[in-house]
């Protein structure tokens, strides 16, 4: 979205599906300030590796993974 500034946010919260997180991973990372963090959830644990790979490919570092039942929550920052 051209209405959101690059490097605008300290935090981005995304409780959306694995497919959407994969699609938006680079854009979400771009909206973060250098010290910013994405907190992502809504990902089935069986799909976590796909989403992690998308964020890593986009230049992110994934950390603090937590699993509750089938659902995964994790954080991402710029590498």
Image (cartoon, rainbow, N blue to C red):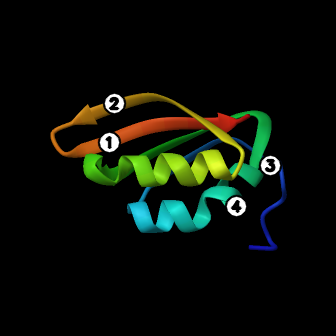
Q: Badge 2: how crowded within 10 Å, few (<14), some, or many (20+)?
A: few
Judge the density around disc 3: few (<14), some (14-19), many (≥20) Cα neighbours within 10 Å.
some
Q: CA separation, marks 2 and 4?
A: 23 Å
Residue at disc 1, secondary structure:
strand
Quarter of the figure with the N terminus: bottom right
User: Mark 1 — residue?
Assistant: 72
Q: Could you classify mark 1 by the number of other residues whose Cα lies within 10 Å: few (under 14), some (14-19), or many (20 or more)?
A: some
Closer to us: 16 or 22: 22
**On the picture, is 28 further left or further right than 72?**
right
**Residue contact between numbered discs 1 and 2, judged by CB atoms under 8 Å:** yes
Q: In the rendered view, does 28 fall on the left or right side of 46?
A: right
> Residue at 69% across / 52% down in the picture?
58
Which of disc 2 and disc 1 is earlier in sequence? 2
At 84% from the left and 59% from the top, the residue drawn is 5
- Check the picture and name the quadrant holding the C terminus: top right
Q: CA distance from mark 1 to mark 4?
A: 21 Å
Spot the residue most to the bottom.
2
Q: Are marks 3 and 1 in contact (CB under 8 Å)?
A: no
Query: CA gap, disc 4 to disc 3?
Result: 12 Å
Q: Earlier in the sequence, mark 2 or mark 3?
A: 3
Q: Classify mark 3: helix, strand or loop.
A: loop
Distance from disc 2 to disc 3, alpha carbons, whole Å, reads: 26 Å
**Circle number at residue 66:** 2
**Measured Cα–Cα span from mark 1 to mark 2:** 6 Å
Residue named by callout 4:
27
Name the mark on residue 8.
3
Image marks 2 and 3: residues in contact by CB distance under 8 Å: no
Q: Are marks 2 and 4 in contact (CB under 8 Å)?
A: no
Q: Position of residue 76 (x, y in %)?
A: 58, 38
């Amino acid at each position: 979205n051209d209405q959101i500034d690059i490097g605008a946010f300290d935090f981005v919260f995304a409780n959306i599906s694995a497919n959407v997180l994969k699609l938006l991973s680079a854009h979400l990372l771009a909206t973060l300030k250098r010290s910013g963090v994405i907190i992502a959830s809504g990902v089935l644990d069986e799909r976590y590796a796909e989403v992690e790979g998308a964020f890593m490919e986009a230049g992110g570092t994934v950390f603090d993974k937590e699993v509750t039942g089938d659902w995964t929550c994790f954080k991402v920052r710029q590498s």
